[in-house]
Structures are given as C-alpha cells and as structure tokens.
Image (cartoon, rainbow, N blue to C red):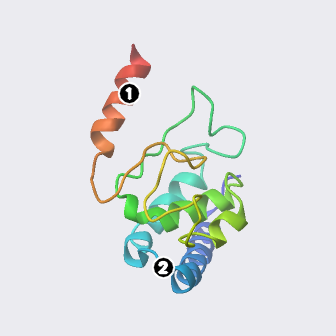
Amino acid sequence: MILNSNKLNKKSLELRKKIFRIVCKRGGHLSTAYSAVEILVSLYFTDILKINSTTYKNNDRNFFLLSKGHGETLLYAVLVEKKIISKNQFNNHYRSGSHSLGGHVDIKTPGIEITSGALGHGLSIGCGIALGKKK
C-alpha cells in the first residue's frame, strides 16, 4: 500500500500518538523515536522498502538498519502497522519480565535486522550486508 502525502502526514501523526501513549505508560526514548517518524513513514509506507508481513524474511528483501537503537519505540510501532509484530507485544514494550520488546532493537524481534543501541554501527553493518549480497 502506497500512501499519498496527506496520508503520509496522517500516518506520521498517528504514530506519534501511539509512541507518546506507550512511552508515557511503559517508558522509552520519546525524542529519539520522534526525530525519525517522517523518515520511517516515508520508507515503510511508500514503495521504497517494500517490507511487509510476508516479505520481511525474503533473502532478496530490502533492509532497514536502525543504527540508533534508542529509536526502538518508533520501529516497533511501524512493525505493528505492517503486521510484523503484534499490538500486544507493542503494548507490553518495556514491561518487567517481558522478553519480547526491550529498550533497544534486537534481532530476536521479527522485522529487526540488527541489534543496536546508541552505537551507530548501521553503516558498517550495511556495507557488510551489501558486500555479502554482491558476492
């Protein structure tokens, strides 16, 4: 599904509301998530990434590497919208004893390509993935 600019703006606002609610309820990194909303909306809700619940595991898929893992709440919200993770998982984000969704993205979560924090390793990992695909 490709959205027009008005719908992309609406999707950005919807995601900001979801992120705000969950951060108030469970914790998280609000400013880090908010700072990339339009970027992820543009990537995930247009024909750029073409990632959805059936393609996110394909060998020839597009990759999205969240180098700033503290933006986890945003990526989790996007993955819920794309039906890759469940709304229940998202609602239990940061819950004590929950092994599902933590404060940094982790490759154990469907739709997450790399484990990261505030590290900035995305570029080097992306280069490795690209080189591996080329070979």
Residue 68 picture location, percent across and down: 35, 58
Q: Which of 26 and 53 is in front in this view?
A: 26
2 or 1: tag closer to the N-terminus: 2
Please give the residue where the numbered disc 1 appears in the rendered image: 130
Q: In which quarter of the image is residue 98?
A: bottom right
Please name the residue shown 57% across and 53% down the image: 44
Q: Which residue lies furthest to the front in this view?
A: 97
Name the residue type under label 2.
Gly
Residue situated furthest top in the rendering? 135
Name the residue rendered at 67%, 61% in the picture. Answer: 81
Check disc 2 and report the residue beneath it.
27
Give the quarter of the figure containing the C terminus. top left
The image quarter containing residue 104 is bottom left
User: Of helix, strand and loop, which one carries label 1?
Assistant: helix
How busy is the neighbourhood of tag 2: few (under 14 within 10 Å), some, or many (20 plus)?
some
In-image side of 88 versus 46 (left or right): right
Between 127 and 13, the residue placed more toward the observer is 127
Q: Which of marks 2 and 1 is in front?
A: 2
Residue 8 x %, y %: 59, 66
Badge 2 element? loop
Q: Observer-nearest residue: 36 or 103?
A: 103
Vertical arrangement, residue 123 with respect to residue 97, above or below: above
At 27% from the left and 37% from the top, the residue drawn is: 124
For residue 80, above or below residue 14: above
